[in-house]
Amino acid sequence: MRTSKRDRILDAAVNVINRDGVRAVTFESVAAEAKLTRGGLLYHFPSREALLRGIDEHLVQAWETSMETLLGKRADEASALERYQTFVRVSAQSATRAELMFMLESADPDADERPWGPAVRRWAPLPPSAGQSDPAALDNFVARLAADGLWILSLADLAPWVPRARRGRP
């Protein structure tokens, strides 16, 4: 099946972000990466805001697809432990700079649309509130925090060994 031009644009934008950061996303940089004209890009995304919203939705969909592929089922068919384990494995092994940047941006409580929130809650919800004790839920959450930390360290290039560890090498 051929990739649609819209998907090609979104994939190109993700490449720009992974390489150069969100600030580098311009109609010109994405059009060049997608090998399209600026007009071709504007046909699908009439504003930079529309492009960024499209990227966000595209990343969430790809992230959830990778989770489902790794686990072999949807989040609602999996146990809490299976969902957390999958979240940790994807975060520690294959998560990208673009996903992290958009996930963090989506955490802004003043953001109008937050597509990451529902997806993350499906796979790795917060532990029970204070006063409730569920050791397994707390263990799962601590594992999630560790995976998030590895993700940030590797993308910020703060620990040179993390990318090798993500690939399964010492």
Image (cartoon, rainbow, N blue to C red):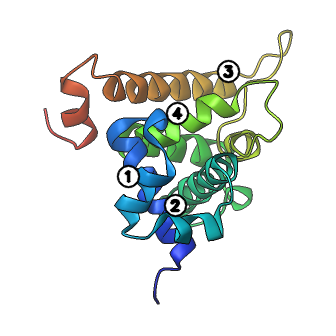
Q: Mark 3 vs mark 1: which is more N-terminal?
A: 1
Q: Whole-Å distance between the Cαs marked 4 and 1?
A: 13 Å
- Mark 2–mark 3 CB contact (< 8 Å): no
Would you name the residue on which mark 1 appears?
Answer: 15
Residue most toward the bottom?
A: 1
For the C terminus, the quadrant is top left
Q: Mark 2 vs mark 3: which is more N-terminal?
A: 2
Q: Which numbered tag is attached to residue 60?
A: none
Residue beneath the point at 49% across and 46% down: 26
Question: Of circles 3 and 1, which is in front?
Answer: 1
Residue in front for this viewpoint, 51 or 15 = 51
Would you name the residue on which mark 2 appears?
Answer: 10
Would you name the residue on which mark 3 appears?
Answer: 135
Q: Mark 4 vs mark 1: which is more N-terminal?
A: 1
Mark 1: amino acid = Asn
Secondary structure type for disc 3: helix
Would you name the residue on which mark 4 appears?
Answer: 101
Q: Whole-Å distance between the Cαs marked 3 and 4?
A: 30 Å
Q: Mark 2 vs mark 1: which is more N-terminal?
A: 2
Secondary structure type for disc 4: helix
Disc 3 residue crowd, few under 14, some 14–19, many 20+, Cα 10 Å? few
Question: Of circles 2 and 4, which is in front?
Answer: 2
Question: Of circles 2 and 3, which is in front?
Answer: 2
